[in-house]
Image (cartoon, rainbow, N blue to C red):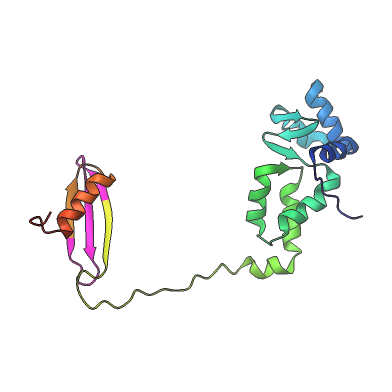
């Protein structure tokens, strides 16, 4: 059987109508839930207070519940870039749901050779060493500290000789920061 991809809300509605469980769930959402349901509907019944129907489709909170006929195609779409289990789950949890979705995602990722190859190899960032310094004030590091005793502090460190400049200021906003840095870099007689 070729996986079917729901392209429109109308198609999703048709799939929902053909999916016996989901059609029953939609009926219960619109008409009220019975006191007990069959075990096959238990996943939906446990979420009954969070389910709604919109345009004939069933939603769990803001996620569309996908009819079973479309599960394989939706899994293919989630897996197309081999993002790994965590990313696939995160993406799915933002938009869709069906009972056993997490297990289905894990199954597809475990059966994929590409995903297995990338599973234990985090992306490697190339090391970029700092250039060798030849003189003072050629590379500076600046940060804020605070609040401490109702003051903020600009901390400037020279990477060559580890000279520190620490200046108090009222807030770490742009204006006070510019004034403090001007006091460090500019000769007050020329400003």
In magenta segment, residue 94: no
Residue, far front: 190
- Comparing 190 with 184, the one in front is 190
Q: Is residue 40 above or below residue 119?
A: above
Q: Position of residue 39 (x, y in %)?
A: 83, 36
Q: Is residue 187 above or below residue 8?
A: below
Q: Position of residue 128 (x, y in %)?
A: 41, 73
- Quadrant holding the N terminus: bottom right
- Determine whether, in the image, residue 88 is placed left or right of residue 143: right
- Determine whether, in the image, residue 133 is placed left or right of residue 72: left
Tell me which residue sits at (10%, 57%) in the image: 190
Q: How many marks?
A: 0
Residue 33 visible? The answer is: no
In magenta segment, residue 160: yes
Tell me which residue sits at (12%, 54%) in the image: 191
* Secondary structure mostly taken by the magenta-highlighted segment of the chain: strand
Q: Position of residue 85 (x, y in %)?
A: 66, 57
- Comparing 111 with 136, the one in front is 136
Tell me which residue sits at (73%, 38%) in the image: 64
Rendering quarter of residue 186: bottom left
- Comparing 40 with 150, the one in front is 150
- Comparing 178 with 135, the one in front is 178
**The magenta segment:** 145-164
Rendering quarter of residue 68: top right
- Determine whether, in the image, residue 145 is placed left or right of residue 130: left
Residue, far top: 31
Q: Position of residue 112 (x, y in %)?
A: 74, 65
Rendering quarter of residue 156: bottom left
């Amino acid at each position: 059987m070729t996986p079917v991809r729901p392209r429109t809300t109308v198609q999703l509605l048709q799939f929902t109508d053909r999916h016996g469980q989901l059609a029953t769930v939609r009926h219960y959402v619109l008409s009220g839930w019975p006191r007990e349901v069959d075990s096959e509907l238990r996943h939906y019944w446990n979420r009954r207070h969070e389910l709604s129907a919109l345009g004939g489709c069933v939603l769990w909170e803001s996620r569309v519940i996908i009819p079973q006929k479309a599960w394989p195609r939706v899994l293919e779409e989630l897996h197309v870039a081999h993002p790994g289990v965590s990313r696939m789950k995160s993406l799915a949890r933002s938009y869709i749901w069906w009972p056993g979705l997490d297990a289905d995602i894990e199954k597809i990722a475990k059966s994929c050779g590409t995903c297995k190859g990338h599973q234990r190899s985090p992306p490697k960032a190339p090391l970029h060493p700092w250039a060798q310094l030849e003189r003072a004030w050629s590379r500076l590091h600046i940060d804020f500290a605070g609040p401490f005793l109702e003051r903020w502090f600009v901390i400037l460190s020279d990477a060559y000789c580890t000279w520190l400049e620490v200046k108090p200021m009222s807030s770490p906003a742009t204006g006070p920061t510019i004034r403090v840095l001007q006091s460090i870099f500019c000769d007050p007689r020329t400003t």
